[in-house]
Image: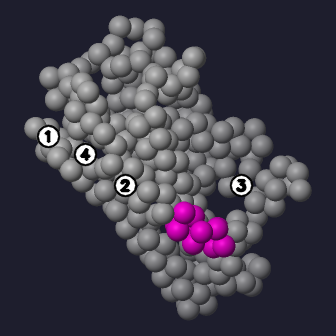
Amino acid sequence: MTLTTTLTDLANPTKFLSLTARLLPWLIAATAILLLIGLYMSAAAPDDYQQGATVKIMFIHVPNAWLSMFVWGVMSIASLGTLVWRHPLADVAAKSAAPIGAAFTFLALVTGSLWGRPMWGTYWEWDARLTSVLILFLMYLGLMALWRAVEDPSRAARAAAILTLVGAINLPIIKFSVDWWNTLHQPASVFRMGGPTLDRAFLLPLLVMAVAFSLLFVTLHLAAMRNEILRRRVRSLQMMQAGQQAA
Amino acid sequence: MSLGPYATFIVTSYALVAAMVLFLIGWIVLDYRRQQQRLRELEASGVVRRSGRSATETR
């Protein structure tokens, strides 16, 4: 089956709901198992010779920070689906991902702040990395407000898609802010030229937690998309009811 | 396992993440139940989809 055929099949919300119903139990189980393994590995990881036990905050801060950008990336692809291919589920995917992405971004900011206080001596610094992530969080909130403010779903979808694609400019700024500017935030230590600089004792739990949080996102996103499809069914049935009552 | 002098920062971080994840799960589960309930009420009032299939059908 080609990717095009798969995407065309999934354009049918009923088929998508059927697929989601089959996938969700497996995803929930896989997420729970991987989270438990990740948490165990994080607890068992040794203290860092400089940071001590505060290095354990990294195992939750970094996955949330990665996902804050990844979710906006998913929303950007979905926005292309809305504007270019007019895929019926593209807007559903983008709209459902936004609150989850906002939650991950909020957690990245707060856990980063709680890590920064003992390590840097401050909860917050207006450096390029922290500020650009704060802007990402505000953009998530702005998008959610836009979807709520515009009553016509198709108009809201187009406006949100344009805003999402414009906002995607922030992603490389976040990623490379630590290279382009002199920041308090440390440079990349996992995805970098020359390979990770992290010791295996920290890298393995971090990667397991990153996969666990990614699975958590996929699970929550599929469930939220299912809710959004049902919400649209409610809306269309309410409009039919109003039409019947008017006639 | 000793978390050293900064245990409060570490425990608060993990507790916040756990609380937010539980909040997201709860919000999505409650939203699902709310939408299913609204669809059942609409069907009970006689409104049906053009396809004639049940609106609450997800399989």
- Nearest to the eye among marks 4 and 2: give it: 2
User: Which mark, residue B4?
Assistant: 1
- Magenta span covers which residues? A20-30
**Disc 4 residue crowd, few under 14, some 14–19, many 20+, Cα 10 Å:** many
Which residue, given by chain and number where applicable, does mark 4 sit on?
B13
Report if residue A245 is visible in the image: no
Distance from the alpha carbon under mark 1 to that under mark 4:
15 Å
Distance from the alpha carbon under mark 1 to that under mark 3:
52 Å
| Residue A201 point in image, percent of width and height | 41, 37
* First-in-chain label (1 vs 4): 1
For this rendering, which residue is in front, A112 or A174? A112
Magenta residues: mostly which secondary structure?
A: helix
Distance from the alpha carbon under mark 4 to that under mark 3:
38 Å
What amino acid is found at the position of numbered circle 2 in the picture?
A: Tyr
Which residue, given by chain and number where applicable, does mark 2 sit on?
A40
Cβ–Cβ under 8 Å for marks 1 and 3: no
Pointer 4 indicates a residue of which chain? B
- Residue at point 43% right, 27% down? A198
Cβ–Cβ under 8 Å for marks 2 and 1: no
Are the residues under badges 4 and 3 in a single subunit?
A: no
**Residue A62 vs residue A231: left or right?**
left
Q: Secondary structure at mark 3?
A: loop
Pointer 1 indicates a residue of which chain? B
| Residue A217 point in image, percent of width and height | 51, 52
- Nearest to the eye among marks 3 and 2: give it: 2
Report if residue B29 is visible in the image: yes
Q: Secondary structure at mark 4?
A: helix
Res. A194 image quadrant: top right
Q: Residue furthest right?
A: A1
